[in-house]
Image (cartoon, helix red, strand yellow):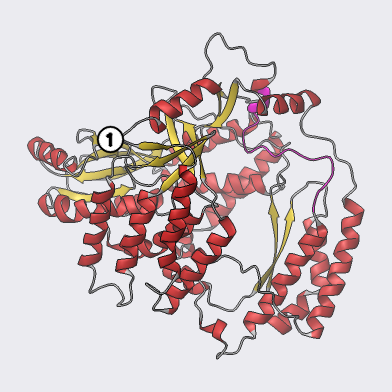
Amino acid sequence: MNLAMHNLCGSKTNLPIGTKRLLGLGLNYCIKKPYPDNNIEETIDKFIRDIRSTHYWNNIHEDDPLNQRKYIPKLYIKSDHWEPKAASPEVEEAVSKFVDRLTQEHHKYHKRWSKPNLTKQQFQLLKYLKNNDLLIVVPSDKNLGPVIMERSVYIRRCLDGFLNLPTQYERLQNKEHIRTDKKLHYTMDRFIGNKYSTTIEESIRADFFNRGRKLHGTNIAKFRATVKVHKLPAQKLRPVIAKCGTSIECLSKWLDYELQKLKKYIPTYIKNSEEYHHKITSRRWPAGTRIIAADATAMYDNIEIDHGIEAIKLWLDSLKDELPGDYPHEAILDALNVVMRNNLAEFGDCHFKQIRGTAMGTSVAVIYAGLYYGWHEKAKLLPTYDQFILDMSRFVDDMTVLWLGSHNDYLNFKRDVNNYGILKWTMEEPSNKAIFLDLDMTISEEGVISTRTFQKPMNLYLYIPPQSAHQDGLMKGIVYGELKRYLWQNTKREDYIKMVSKFFQRCLKRNWPYKRLYRIFIDANRKLADSKSSQATQNATMSQEQHDNEGNKKRDRVFLKLKFHPNYIPRKKIRELYEEELEDVLRDQLGVDQFTICYSRAQ
């Protein structure tokens, strides 16, 4: 079995026996508990609330004040004081019958013992590593497998590489972080009060901020880092600030929601590599076209705050006639100042404030960085080099250009690419080959682009093994998704077959039985052959506006939320109970035609 990890410990550090066998299972490996631990009362309460909420919203009167409010999924936090009223007597009676039978099934299963999927020694080692002061296990960047290293080295690299840099972070002394956070709370009052609240959508924003502040209080984000094992030196880290669960992240989420409306104006914007692949392979390019690949150096760190906000202001000013009249220009610029200048993080018992660059870990960071450099592309690069650039596409800090110009023109272009603030790009010479995202591209002399799958050499390919406590259908989804991706990525059939063969062998090495795996692959390949993969993907993709509108449609499904355990009530049995007791009533009374069983990972 493939049980691999990235061991970055020094030669004098001896790892405990069995470390590789444990970590090689992968960081997504689900440990099976001896007994299912679903809280059936909590599950039932959530299910009943969901049905009553569906009844309320599907029967709400047009003049009801709540009906005038637009539902924006990104800007929603459940109210802690609103409870839906009981549904109709018929619905309540049917729900009661379903709940009674579900509870009976729960009592049959919740005391059934299961054999653990870790040995006693592995459980002991897991506990030892968790409490170890000398070693630390962290994820690698790009999801290339688990990393184990000395804790002291990890801490030193976090400090020396990021937190102790006087140009990047400021250490907050004593209880200064508490004072800074309280000041921030007062600053956010203007986004909750009447200063910017003039429309229905802005009142939703105020409620979102208010609820978020009550829910998250004075929580401060944690600083951590992943390891860039795919880049030399191998122990270089990527900083991560976990802003989720902090009050200021609510402000950042709102900014992301508003600025996402501008992404369609970024001339080089691409959603993902599939969209880019379709764009460049659906036509023939002029003979002699070459590819330039570029990668930004620490993009987030090298966007100066004043320059970044100025770029957003230029976008807003230039789009005044195209954006809605109530678009919150002033509030956006004000909020950006708050978010970018108040990024606090906790590392151990120390507290830091980021003083330069994009606020790490915030929801708005990606679109903010995209718009920042997008203005330079729109205002300088594309107008100046329009005659040489056949296509220019960028995914955050990765850029590719289809180029038809001389070497001197390229040198001038390279100079101007790097002449924007302090952000610098590493650029390759124009070539007939390039790597962009997960595509290995080649362009012929006739201007035809072919692609194949690119995979980083340090990837350990730790796919979920069959003994992990995941749902049975998980592997089917993984295989179908990978084969679907390989199909559009590889222009030549032989490259596709080669990738599928490699994938099959890698799954075998993760202990999947040959016959079972073979059936899964055959079924996935048959489904792909019967459907137009990329067209289905495009049709399934919704724009932000469409997604928001979906939230305002009548609710036509209900959810039952459970923690997954292999030996708990089978999904088939739960669905059988629903069909017998609830399906007809909910369809006739509420218009519900979908029942979804949502499994979460057991903690």
Q: Nearer the viewer, residue 509 or 395?
A: 395
Q: Nearer the viewer, residue 439 or 220?
A: 220
Which is the main secondary structure of the residues drawn in magenta?
loop
Residue at the extreme top of the image, as rendered: 12
User: Looking at the picture, does residue 128 appear above or below residue 215?
Assistant: above
In the drawing, does residue 311 fall left or right of residue 158? left
Residue 344, percent from left and from top? 44, 45
In the drawing, does residue 57 fall left or right of residue 249? right
In the drawing, does residue 445 fall left or right of residue 221? left
Q: The residue under label 1 is which amino acid type?
A: Lys
Classify mark 1: helix, strand or loop: strand
Q: Which residues are magenta?
A: 21-38
Give the residue at x 14% y 44%: 404
The answer to whether residue 366 of the structure is visible from this angle is no
| Residue annotated with mark 1 | 433
Quadrant of image for the C terminus:
top right
The answer to whether residue 385 of the structure is visible from this angle is yes
Give the residue at x 80% y 26%: 120
Give the residue at x 73% y 83%: 588
Was residue 448 drawn as part of the magenta stretch in this picture?
Answer: no
Residue 515, percent from left and from top? 71, 37
Q: How many marks?
A: 1
Neighbour tally class for label 1: few under 14, some 14-19, many 20 plus, Cα within 10 Å: some
Was residue 36 drawn as part of the magenta stretch in this picture?
Answer: yes
User: Looking at the picture, does residue 429 appear above or below residue 261?
Assistant: above
Quadrant of image for the N terminus:
top right
In the drawing, does residue 377 fall left or right of residue 397? left
Residue 509, percent from left and from top? 63, 28
Residue 378, percent from left and from top? 19, 56
Give the residue at x 33% y 76%: 326
Q: Nearer the viewer, residue 123 or 307?
A: 307
